[in-house]
Amino acid sequence: MSLSPIPRGLYSSVTDISPQLLAAKGIRLVLADLDNTLVAYRVTEPPAELMAWKAALEAAGIRLFLLSNSRKPGRAQNFAEKLGIPYQGHSGKPRRAGYLRAMERMGARPEETVMVGDQIFTDTLGANNAGVIPLLVQPIRLAGNPFRYVRYAIETPFRALGKRRPFL
């Protein structure tokens, strides 16, 4: 376990992460952040591309699990139900306890689990701390919150380092 903020690769979107390559690396579980990772903030319906990616994960023998920090009542639950996957809201990322609970629920070990997220200081840092492989995606949309611009600017060097050490 490591407190490193450096991800294992930078991917354009979740759908650019190959289920077949994940399976070839022994991955059985994908933990995924919701907002700005799977869909933009306030999007309530899974788009067709995301549904197809989930189906491809399942075909490769990989389960998808929504691991969200969202505090909006019902946000994670409603989206996960529409996508047909288990979820955990109020996960407390970057603390490792949320990651460990999710893996325990799904019967997976850290070495066979990846975390896909858009933020260094929650998703990547927490995954590394829990012994999970962190895969970073470009945020879907920055508009709407000035703090997001600042946060992503601070994350830039870590994103650059992660881009140089891809998992896939």
Image (cartoon, rainbow, N blue to C red):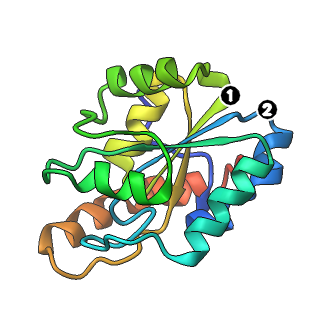
Residue 61 located left or right of residue 50 = right
Q: Is residue 54 visible?
A: yes
Q: Is residue 39 above or below residue 83?
A: below
**Considering only order in the chain, which callout, 1 or 2, is on the residue closer to the N terminus?**
2
Q: Nearer the viewer, residue 23 or 141?
A: 23
The spot of residue 150 in percent (x, y) is 20, 67
User: Which residue lies at the image location 40% right of the left edge and 63% below the top edge?
Assistant: 156
Q: Secondary structure at mark 1?
A: helix
Q: Amino acid at mark 1?
A: Glu
Residue 13 located left or right of residue 79 = right
User: Which residue lies at the image location 32% right of the left edge and 43% below the top edge?
Assistant: 122
Q: Nearer the viewer, residue 112 or 42?
A: 42
Q: Which mark is residue 112?
A: 1
Callouts 2 and 1 close, C-beta under 8 Å: yes
Q: Residues within 10 Å of mark 1 (few under 14, many from 20)?
A: some
| Occupied quadrant, residue 126 | top left
The spot of residue 8 in percent (x, y) is 61, 46
In this view, the residue farthest toward the right is 24
Q: Which mark is residue 26?
A: 2
Q: Secondary structure at mark 2?
A: loop
User: Which residue lies at the image location 60% right of the left edge and 75% below the top edge?
Assistant: 49
Residue 10 located left or right of residue 18 = left
Q: Amino acid at mark 2?
A: Gly
Q: Residues within 10 Å of mark 2 (few under 14, many from 20)?
A: some
